[in-house]
Structures are given as C-alpha cells and as structure tokens.
Image: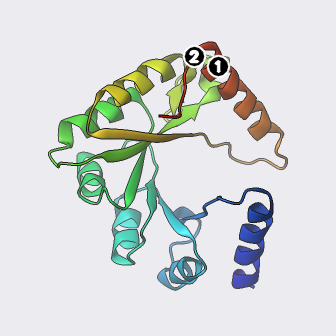
C-alpha cells in the first residue's frame, strides 16, 4: 500500500507539473526500512535535525533538504561538508550569517529561504521562517556572497484540509516579490 500511495502521489503531481520533485519528510516516520522504500520510488530526503541528516547521508540520498529552526553549528557544518547533496533551508537572517561564518569550503552552498508569510500579518515573531519585511535584505545578502547559491523560496503551512491557505500565501509572496522588484531567475 505504501508503494501504491507514494507512486500515486508522484504521478498525480507529474500529470500537471512535469518537473516536480518529491521529498520524504523523515519526521513523519524515520524507520530506515520505510525510508529506503520511498527512496527506491524516487523520493529525495527532507530532514530536520542532526540525526535525520546523518541518516539521509548514510542511506546515500543524492538530494537532501535540511529544514528546521535553530540549526546548531554541528548540523550546519555537516550540511556544508555535504554541500553537493544538501540544500539548507534557512529560517532567519542569523542562520545565513552562521552559514557564511562556518563555510571554509570552496564551492557554493545551496540555500533556500523559508518564508513565514503569516509573521507580517500576525505581527509576532516565529521560529519558522523569515518575515516578509526581512526577505529582500536576506535575498540581497545571499546574492552578494560568492559562496552562496540561492536556489529557491520555501514556505510551510501545517494542518490544512484545503489548498486555500497555500494559495493565499503564494499570492502574498508573489505580490511582495513583484512590489519589491525581486527577480529570482538568475
């Protein structure tokens, strides 16, 4: 049943978005047997901590998204060491500063910026993502560093029964990018 559901999920998206990629969130179930199974079905790894990152590397995933607030220096150093496999989803400008400080390797560290669209609306701090008001400055800082490759933006909305919240966030972020003349294609 796992195989059927995993393939059905991929096929449904690929029907409409040909170049889509799929990442299995280890936090949903990190049983190695299950992870190996979804890997064999073409899924990449989505990890949120040191143990999950170590497991994804041990299982030889070729593409790993490393998301999670408050990443330690140890976690960031392991991600940087494996920069050919790992994309670091940063949650705040300080995390970008830490990556720049820790990076002693040559070559580019791939990052994406996790955005918290709700932070600006709710006017409160969140550990999950960069506030929209700080996004332009964060993008500019990433682009100025020759060892950073900004490859995307990310947001997450938990506990949704419908796509309404995702659609609202996409429109909000799109409007922000347009209003601030931010072109992500370069």
Q: Nearer the viewer, residue 54 or 183?
A: 183
Residue 47 placed where, x, y %? 46, 60
Label 2: which residue? 181
Q: Nearer the viewer, residue 118 or 166?
A: 166
Label 1: which residue? 178
Residue 179 placed where, x, y %? 64, 13
Q: Is residue 48 above or below residue 92?
A: below
Residue in the image at 42% along x and 69% along y: 62
> Do tag 1 and tag 2 residues touch (Cβ < 8 Å)?
yes
Disc on res. 143: none
Mark 2, Cα crowd under 10 Å, few <14 / some 14-19 / many 20+, is few
Residue 82 placed where, x, y %? 28, 60
70 vs 120, left or right, is: left
Residue sticking out furthest to the top? 179
94 vs 124, left or right, is: left
Residue 71 placed where, x, y %? 35, 45
Q: Quadrant of residue 103?
A: top left
Residue in the image at 32% along x and 39% along y: 148
What kind of element bears circle 2?
loop
User: Rounded to the nearest whole Å, what is the CA distance between mark 1 and mark 2?
Assistant: 5 Å
Mark 1, Cα crowd under 10 Å, few <14 / some 14-19 / many 20+, is few
155 vs 16, left or right, is: left
Q: Is residue 32 above or below residue 56?
A: below
Q: Quadrant of residue 49?
A: bottom left
Residue in the image at 78% along x and 47% along y: 160
Count of numbered labels shown in the rendering: 2
Residue in the image at 48% along x and 20% along y: 136
Q: Is residue 41 above or below residue 143?
A: below
């Amino acid at each position: 049943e796992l195989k059927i559901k995993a393939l059905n999920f991929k096929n449904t998206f690929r029907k409409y978005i040909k170049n889509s990629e799929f990442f299995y969130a280890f936090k949903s179930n990190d049983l190695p047997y299950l992870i190996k199974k979804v890997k064999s079905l073409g899924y990449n790894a989505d990890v949120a901590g040191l143990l999950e990152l170590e497991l994804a590397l041990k299982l030889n995933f070729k593409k790993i998204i490393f998301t999670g607030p408050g990443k330690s220096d140890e976690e960031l150093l392991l991600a940087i060491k494996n920069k050919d496999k790992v994309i670091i989803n940063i949650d705040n400008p300080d995390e970008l500063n830490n990556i720049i400080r820790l990076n002693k390797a040559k070559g580019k560290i791939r990052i994406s910026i996790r955005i918290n669209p709700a932070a600006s609306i709710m006017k409160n701090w969140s550990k999950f993502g960069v506030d929209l008001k700080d996004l332009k400055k964060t993008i500019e800082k990433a682009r100025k560093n020759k060892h950073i490759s900004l490859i995307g933006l990310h947001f997450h909305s938990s506990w949704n029964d419908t796509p309404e919240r995702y659609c609202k966030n996409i429109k909000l972020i799109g409007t922000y990018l347009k209003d601030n003349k931010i072109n992500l294609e370069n």
